[in-house]
Image (tube, grey):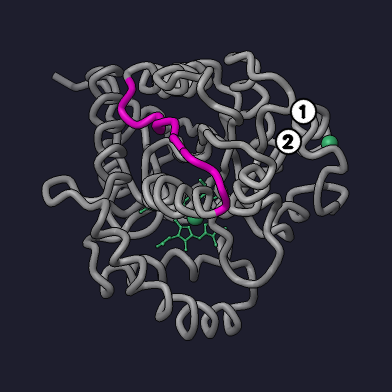
Amino acid sequence: MSKKAKKGVLLVQLGTPNAPTTGEVRKYLTEFLMDPRVMDIPYISRSLLVKGIIVPRRAPRSADTYSTIWCEKTGSPLMRYSLDQQKMLQADLGEEYHVELAMRYQEPSIPKAMKNLEGMFLESLTVIPLFPQYASATTGSVIDRVMELMRSWQYFPKLNFVSSYCEDPLMVEVISDHARYHDLQRFDHFLFSYHGLPVRQLAKIDPKKELSCPDFGCESCKKETKPFCYLSQCYATTRAVVAKLGIPEGKYTVCFQSRLGKTPWIQPYTSDSLHELAKSGKKRILVFSPAFVADCIETLDEIKVEYAKEFKESGGQEVEMVESLNNNPKWITALKKMVLENGN
Ligand SMILES: C=CC1=C(C)c2cc3[nH]c(cc4nc(cc5[nH]c(cc1n2)c(C)c5CCC(=O)O)C(CCC(=O)O)=C4C)c(C)c3C=C
Ligand SMILES: [Fe+2]
Ligand SMILES: [Fe+2]
């Protein structure tokens, strides 16, 4: 009796080291930062900068930080929640589907996941990069790698790439639900801190080659002028969450964290915004981090520890954080809807 071909789903997260050691962090950072979509400079300069300066300096420090958030049994928080997301989505979609998880860098690798999927002679394949806002450095790189590996496949199932879901209504609902776990009335101000991006990468995605939107990611940029602009998409997510929670204009700030290197990244930088808010007398801040679908080093250390410390040193009192989407069942339903609505 012949079994019906399965429908495949590939979830792809950024990646994380295999262990919180300098050697493993070095391997992870080298693979990550040598990606030409991440460090979009010529190979020789990239090699000198990444292997000669950034990685040797950063790896020991990052390894120390990873060890503070590491779990003996489940590894890094990003790995733990990504595995939860894969298992829960598999359970929700049922036997008709096969859900694989891969990391763009390190393990479980995209080549291994693609090999498994190829061997299943799939009816269709939906690829969901786990980044709500499109950037060439993240979503673009995932799609690029998947397409590169697929070139050697002997058959081609129906293919879907979910390249952006910055305003997904269910996702916005989960972010808002997680915010409501906090007593919203207690906060003087709300901060939407997104992962940053070099400014030059924005220009590449804009047909007019402008560096930024004069009106900071306005609705028309998002919908008409440059639908793949990361900045416009970050503002779109913010507008959706702010509307859902009824946060008034003037009571929230959009900012960007994790700048790397000396070139300009999109501004304002989170650390400057926190400093200015503290100086203007704000005492209690609630931070959203809607670029991350799972808690990771960027949320658990950079925001919760580093920025919270900086805020207090500048005169503030308290920084609380809205939990990432993690393993919230409603977020898994959002992923399921993306699979079903993308023609699968
Ligand atoms: C959410 C989207 C992300 C974008 C856009 C992004 C761009 C980007 N990142 C770097 C450099 C680093 N990022 C690092 C960690 C990291 N980045 C993302 C997501 C995005 N990056 C996540 C989810 C994580 C966390 C991984 C984890 O294991 O928890 C790091 C490592 C930090 C450290 O080791 O201390 C670097 C470095 C660049 C250069 C870039 C765009 C060009
Ligand atoms: Fe990053
Ligand atoms: Fe605009």
**Picture coordinates of residue 323, whole percent (x, y):** 39, 31
Q: Which mark is residue 149?
A: none
Q: How many labels does the image show?
A: 2
In this rendered view, identify the residue nearer to me: 272 or 334: 272
**Picture coordinates of residue 73, whole percent (x, y):** 11, 47
Disc 1, SS: helix
Asked if residue 268 shows in the view, the reply is: yes
Disc 2, SS: loop
**Could you tell whether 21 is left or right of 240 in the image?**
left
Q: Which residue does the numbered mark 1 point to in the structure image?
A: 223
Asked if residue 343 shows in the view, the reply is: no
**Picture coordinates of residue 275, whole percent (x, y):** 62, 51
Residue 121, picture quadrant: top left
Q: Residue at horizontal 64%, vertical 19%?
A: 247
Establish if 143 lies above or below 84. below
Residue type, label 1 = Lys
**Could you tell whether 316 is left or right of 90 in the image?**
right
Q: Quadrant of the C terminus?
A: top left
Classified by dominant secondary structure, the portion drawn in magenta counts as loop
Q: Give the range drawn in magenta.
A: 314-328
- The answer to whether the residue labelled 1 contacts the one labelled 2, judged by CB atoms less than 8 Å apart, is yes
Q: Residue at horizontal 40%, vertical 22%?
A: 331
Q: Which residue does the numbered mark 2 point to in the structure image?
A: 227
In this rendered view, identify the residue nearer to me: 227 or 6: 227
Residue type, label 2 = Pro
Q: Does the residue labelled 2 lie within 8 Å of ligand 3?
A: no
Whether residue 266 appears in magenta in the rendering, the answer is no
Whether residue 319 appears in magenta in the rendering, the answer is yes
Q: Residue at horizontal 56%, vertical 29%?
A: 165
